[in-house]
Amino acid sequence: MCNIGAAIQVASLVQGYREKKAQNKAIRRDQETTRRNADKAYLHDLNKIDQEKILADQEKLIAEIRTKAKRDGEIAQKVNLGNANNTKIVQSISGLYDEDWIDITRGYDKDIQLFQNQKTEAYANQVKVYNSLKPPTDPSRTGLMLEVATAANGGYQRDLERKEAKKNNG
C-alpha cells in the first residue's frame, strides 16, 4: 500500500516532466521563428549588396564610355587640326586613357571588395544569431521513472514502518 504523500509526489514529478516538455516545445518554436527571421535578414542584406553591385557596374560602364568618348574626341580634334605627329598624339592621349581606366578600375575594385566584406558581415550576423540560440534540454524519461520509483519506494517503506509500529504498539 502506498501513502498519499508518495502519490502526490509521483503526480508532481509527472506533471513537472510534462511542463518541461511543453516549455521546450515553445522554446523550439520560438527559436525556429528566430532562425527564419535571421534567414530573411541575411537574404535582405544579400539583395541590398547585389543591388549596390549592379549600380557600381553601371557607374563603371558609364565612366568607361565617357572616358573613351572624351579621349576619342581629343584624338580626332588634334589629328584634324594637324598638330604634330599623329602617332604621338594617339600615344599621348592613349596614355591619359590608360590612367583614367586605372582610376575607374581601382574605384570599382574597392567597391567589389567592400561588397565582399558586406556579404561576409551579413553571413557572420546570421551565424551569430544561430549560435546565440541555446538548445533546450529535454527532461529524461529514465530520470522520471527513477524519481517515481524512488518516491513510490519511499512511500512503501514509510507504510511498512507504520505497520511495524502498529504491531509493536498493539
Image: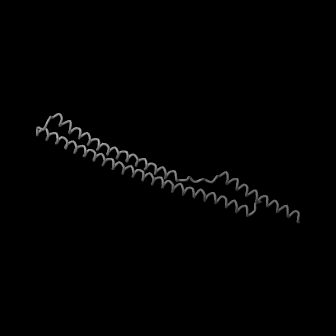
Count of labels in the image: 0
Q: Is residue 103 above or below residue 20?
A: above
Most foreground residue, 70 or 24: 70
For the point 76% across and 58% down, which residue is it?
A: 154
Q: Decide if residue 132 is on the left or right side of residue 8.
A: left
Q: Quadrant of residue 104?
A: top left
Q: Quadrant of residue 13?
A: bottom right
For the point 67% across and 61% down, which residue is it?
A: 12
What residue occupies the far left of the structure in this picture?
Answer: 81
Quadrant showing the N terminus: bottom right
Q: Decide if residue 114 is on the left or right side of residue 83.
A: right
Most foreground residue, 39 or 125: 125
Model colouring: one colour
At which x and y percent is residue 71? 19, 42
Q: Decide if residue 166 is on the left or right side of residue 141.
A: right
Most foreground residue, 88 or 68: 88
At which x and y percent is residue 23? 57, 58
Most foreground residue, 27 or 120: 120
Q: Quadrant of residue 162?
A: bottom right
For the point 11% across and 37% down, which residue is it?
A: 82
What residue occupies the far bottom of the structure in this picture?
Answer: 170
For the point 23% across and 38% down, which residue is it?
A: 95
Quadrant showing the C terminus: bottom right
At which x and y percent is residue 152? 74, 57
At which x and y percent is residue 150? 73, 55
What residue occupies the far front of the structure in this picture?
Answer: 84
